Image (cartoon, grey):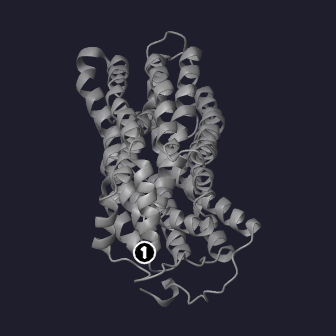
Amino acid sequence: MADSMKIPDVSQEARRPTRAYRNYVLIILTLVYAFNFIDRQIIGILSPFIKVDLGLDDAQLGWLKGFAFALLYTVVGIPIAWLADRYNRINIIGVSLTLWSGFTALSGFAANFWQLAILRVGVGIGEAGGSPPSHSIISDLFDKTERAKALAVYSLGIPFGIMAAYFAAAFFLDGGSADWRIVMISVGAPGVILALLLKFTVKEPVRAKVSHGPQQMDFMTSVKRLLKIPTWWGMCLGISFGSFGNYAISTWIIDFYVRIHPDMPIQKLLIIFGIVNGTAYALGVWLGGVIADKWGEKTKRAYALLPFYAMIIGVPCFYFSLHVGSVWLSIGLLTIMLFGSGMYLGPCFAIAQTLAPVNARAMSTALFFFVLNIIALGGGPTIVGILSASLSTTMGEAEALRTSLSWLLLPYIISIATFYWASTKIEHDWHEAERMQALD
């Protein structure tokens, strides 16, 4: 590893960064995360155009939206997290951002399924270096009483990135007159500029120190410690099965409305869903962190019960949104679902950091995302696509996709049950984490 990637030798007496600087770093990392989701989401938004241009079926689209991206994204995140617990995290994020933005731009030149699949694998490799070091940095800058709120702000990169992807597609496609390739190139290239801004304006923060023992925990020790925490597993599986449905929705929803409600102009759909993600979904993400931290002052169960209640409200709304006849009622019900599902991000990510040893925080996020993305990102879009393709010969493409999306009730039910189970374990595990951190 080059010397520039090593952790700087910072004095223990170094001043804590000002609130203004900490907030600036949080904003920059949130922008990076937004670019992450712009580049991740754009293929689902452009799906109807790619399907026609490259002559793909739903199964091939499902592989592109899910498994091709998740193939190495899930695996590479582990070694990158190991590096992030030892070397300069800002450099790791900057290099990763440059890689995934470049591969997104190159996707605009793909001439067939296999070329686009290989480039999607490249995007996934780059994005693997985004969240684990970012979560680690945020946890060093904000203490555990502010952490869910800070990570909820960081998670706003998801709805704002999705919103930007919708708006960019609506602007460049102009109702379908422009090529989808132009959109890919246009959303990929600016990421390189943001990488330079990150590199030259953000410094590697001082890491939280352990009282005893090594400052970096070895790989197997950190994994074993994390896997022994029931709440860590409960929150991880809760967000994983919830996101199984959410990733499937986000990558197939435009196809759904184009097929089920063909009278709605696609450019209008793109603008509507851009607004919905930038308002209702974003508000749910932000409130999830705020409410969890406030409610968590009274009971630590709040971090698991808030996602539990939000999903109980949102999931039925999603199911009915698939079956109502009015396109506007359908969008309204789906908006409620997006608001509720956004609430689990801040609490889940906060628990992944709070329950982890301080010298294994990046590894905690990477392992969290490994499970999350194997189940959700690799499974959700891909399985819906395969199921839709298998049903289309007998049901037609529109009803096949509606039926496939309806089956998402199953992973959502698992998510709800798992969040409740985690709420019964969290008090004990929280106190145990505090005890172990005092001994480390």
Residue 119 in view, yes or no = no
Q: Position of residue 197 (x, y in %)?
A: 66, 70
Check disc 1: other Cα within 10 Å, few if <14, some if 14-19, many if 20+.
few
The structure residue drawn at horizontal position 49% and vertical position 85%, both measured from the top left corner, is 6
Judged left or right of residue 398, residue 257 is: right
Q: Position of residue 219 (x, y in %)?
A: 31, 73
Q: Which residue is mark 1?
A: 439
Q: Position of residue 209 (x, y in %)?
A: 52, 79
The structure residue drawn at horizontal position 38% and vertical position 56%, both measured from the top left corner, is 368
Q: Position of residue 136 (x, y in %)?
A: 51, 67
In the rendered view, would you say 198 is above or below 320?
A: below
Residue nearer the viewer, 37 or 213:
213
Residue nearer the viewer, 232 or 302:
302
State which quadrant residue 222 falls in: bottom left
State which quadrant residue 8 falls in: bottom right
Q: Secondary structure at mark 1?
A: helix
Quadrant location of the N terminus?
A: bottom left
